[in-house]
Image: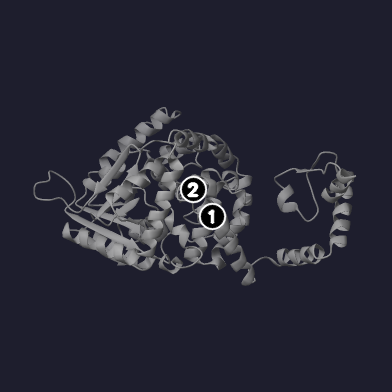
Amino acid sequence: MSGHVPTSSAFKSNSQEALVNRNLQAALRGSRGNFIAKRAAARANVPEFDDIRDQARDMKNHVLANLDLYLEAYEKKVTEAGGHVHWAETAEDARRIVLDICRKSNAKTVNKGKTMISEECGINDHLAENGIKPVETDLGEYIIQLRGEIPSHIIAPAVHVTVPEIEEAFRKHHAHLPPDRDLSELASLQAEARSELRAKYFEAEVGITGANMLIAETGQSVIVTNEGNGDLSQSLPKVHIVMASLEKIVPTLEDSATLLRLLARSATGQEMSVYTTFSSGPKRSEDPDGPEEYHVVLLDNGRSNMIGTEFEEMLRCIRCGACMNHCPVYQSVGGHAYGWVYPGPMGAVLTPSLIGVEEGGQLPNASTFCGRCEAVCPMRIPLPKMMRSWREREFEKNLTPSATRYGLGVWAWAAQRPWAYRLAARIANRSLGITGKSKFSKLPLAGGWTKFRDFPAPQGGTFMDQWKAGKR
């Protein structure tokens, strides 16, 4: 299979490596809080923000209940505008369709805007294996392409990379440039990337972009970016390919405006992204520029199986990244620990849906259930509830570790016998009080916790003892 092979089943080992990776931890510390503060400020400036969330949720629920009708309406509009819609049931189908379009165009180079669907399908590797060079034009995607990595965040793909690491990648891959140039500042790094990518825009025969939305009323695709690369990647080549998943459909232009009011504020704390581009087919005879061919590849890849299940609400996701920006687990281990394309709380729900609980079952356990992800989600997706559902399925399939299953059995036995539970709690409380005065670096049967965290010593007696004392 082309593309990144999921390692989601290795989340525990992935996360342990992430916690001791100094460069990664430095990068995460640098980004931690920026997204949160900016989102909070942008949200505070819109008193009706929660009302917009309700409207968006209801609109997407309506779309999912009538998805077949809206997809047919969208296809009709695209065809009327001179475009082509291709239906891809699997990632393999999508790879075959994209490669076929590129070959018919005699493409040697393909420029790509940021698209998580192409990551899901492994488009870059597939094109390269067949003699076609893919070039990522988004700055973050370009950096990780040079480093041979996958995105670690759905809107900031290189958030895990430090400035010295970017400089190292540029010096390695831009060896034709003067070795004494200064790359110590972000501005100089951006200038170098811009100069390198600018020439590539005119070389590519095909441009691939994703789509934040597909509008059934008009047949338009919408991309939202903060760089001009998306527009250049789709307007300069003679062929434009849009890759999108089925649930990106919205009924009308007005509905797209509703989502736009939520998207940038939730993602980056902006009122609007710098570029919001609506595309509708190939150029017409009177147009001065634009692609000669316009193709839309609509990917299912397991999403239709989510319709009508307890995971259907996940299909409301607009890929803003707010859930991972606020998640204490993601902020501790980064996106690569999740082992596939979609990290954070949304990935903990979506990944098992797409690749199976056998492979992705560890991810729903990577949560403190603090509820921040649901609180900030602009589409009001009940992520903790769905993670609990995946935990239940994992347990039912006997996929949870035996130690966990036996531990739950012991706890259940004690929980049904209050005298045993209280006795065990008193013994544990007094033992921990003797072992340490304030913190523990090691704790029996809890090495996974205390290896990277301090466990505070209990203060006073057990809850029940303190409760009884308070009643006297």
Whole-percent x and y of residue 202?
A: 22, 44
Q: Looking at the picture, how far across and down is residue 84, in whole percent?
A: 22, 61
Describe the element under mark 1 as helix, strand or loop. Answer: helix
Between 11 and 20, the one nearer to me in the picture? 11
Give the percent coordinates (x, y) of residue 99.
29, 62
Residue in the foreground of this view, choosing between 174 and 151: 151
**Looking at the image, residue 184 lies above or below residue 104:** above
Alpha carbon distance from label 1 to label 2: 9 Å
Give the labeled residue for mark 2: 377
Q: Secondary structure at mark 2?
A: loop
| Residue at 23% across, 54% down | 218
Using a 10 Å C-alpha cutoff, classify the residue at mark 2 as few (fewer than 14 neighbours), some (14 to 19) or many (20 or more).
many
Q: Residue furthest left?
A: 286
How far from the left and from the top, in percent, is residue 190?
38, 33
Left or right, residue 104 beside residue 313: left
Please determine whether, in this image, residue 414 is positioned above or below residue 153.
Answer: below
Q: Which corner quadrant of the image does residue 29 belong to?
A: top right
Say which of 365 and 61 sits in front: 61
Is residue 276 visible from the viewing direction of this image? yes
Give the quarter of the figure containing the N terminus: bottom left
Residue 179 — which label?
none
For the point 49% across and 67% down, the residue is 309
The residue at 78%/44% (across/down) is: 441
Instruction: Tell me, yes or no, if residue 103 can be seen here.
Output: no
Specify whether 339 is left or right of 186: right
Residue 383 is marked as 1
Do labels 1 and 2 touch, CB within 8 Å? yes
- Please tell me how crowded label 1 is: few (under 14), some (14-19), or many (20+) other residues with Cα within 10 Å: many
What is the quadrant of residue 178 in the picture?
A: top left
Amino acid on which disc 1 is placed: Leu
For badge 2, the amino acid type reads: Cys
User: Would you say 429 lies left or right of 447 here?
Assistant: right
